[in-house]
Amino acid sequence: MHLRYIITLSLLLSGSAVATASSHDIFGTWTRGDNAARVKMATCGEQICATNIWIKDPAQQNEKVGDRLIFKIKQSGDSWSGTGYDPQRKLNLSAKLHASADSMTTTGCVLAGLICRSTTWTRN
């Protein structure tokens, strides 16, 4: 299990309702701060999915194109929070994010909040 992948993608959250385009809109394509992954945030049923659309080195990163995280999150002001699920690793997590027009910071926690990590993303 690659904890960095789980936490960073899990942090690309969004709410259970489709958001309108604004500076806090998390929908679209985002590049992770280390430039090693790109994800597309979009609705998938009643949830939000962060789906890998590009991975720099799949073998080294233990990630592949098509992997996704499924979020149940809600927006409050300019922040989003809720839970996420990684079906590839069968892992549940909590997540928070803050988005601006061209960047997003995500924070994800596993093990009842004992392990947390923040990641910065850039809108494509």
Image (cartoon, grey):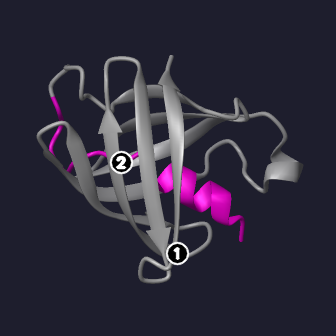
Instruction: Check residue 13 in the rendering and tell me which mark sits there, or answer none.
Output: 2
Q: CA distance from mark 2 to mark 1?
A: 15 Å
| Residue found farthest to the left | 77
79 lies left or right of 108: left
Query: From which residue to which does the magenta span run?
Result: 1-19
Residue placed at 55% from the left, 51% from the top? 8
Residue 76 place in picture, x, y as percent: 12, 46
Which residue type carries mark 2? Leu
Compared to residue 30, the image places residue 64 above or below, namely: below
Hey, which residue is sitting farthest right in the picture? 59
Q: Which mark is residue 91?
A: 1
As drawn, is 13 to the left or to the right of 46? right
- Disc 1 marks which amino acid? Leu
**Is residue 17 in sight in this rendering?**
yes
Q: Is residue 118 left or right of residue 61?
A: left
The structure residue drawn at horizontal position 53% and vertical position 67%, both measured from the top left corner, is 87
Residue 94 appears at what percent x and percent y? Answer: 37, 67
Residue at horizontal 32 percent and vertical 18 percent from the top:
101
At x 24%, y 28%, the residue is 24
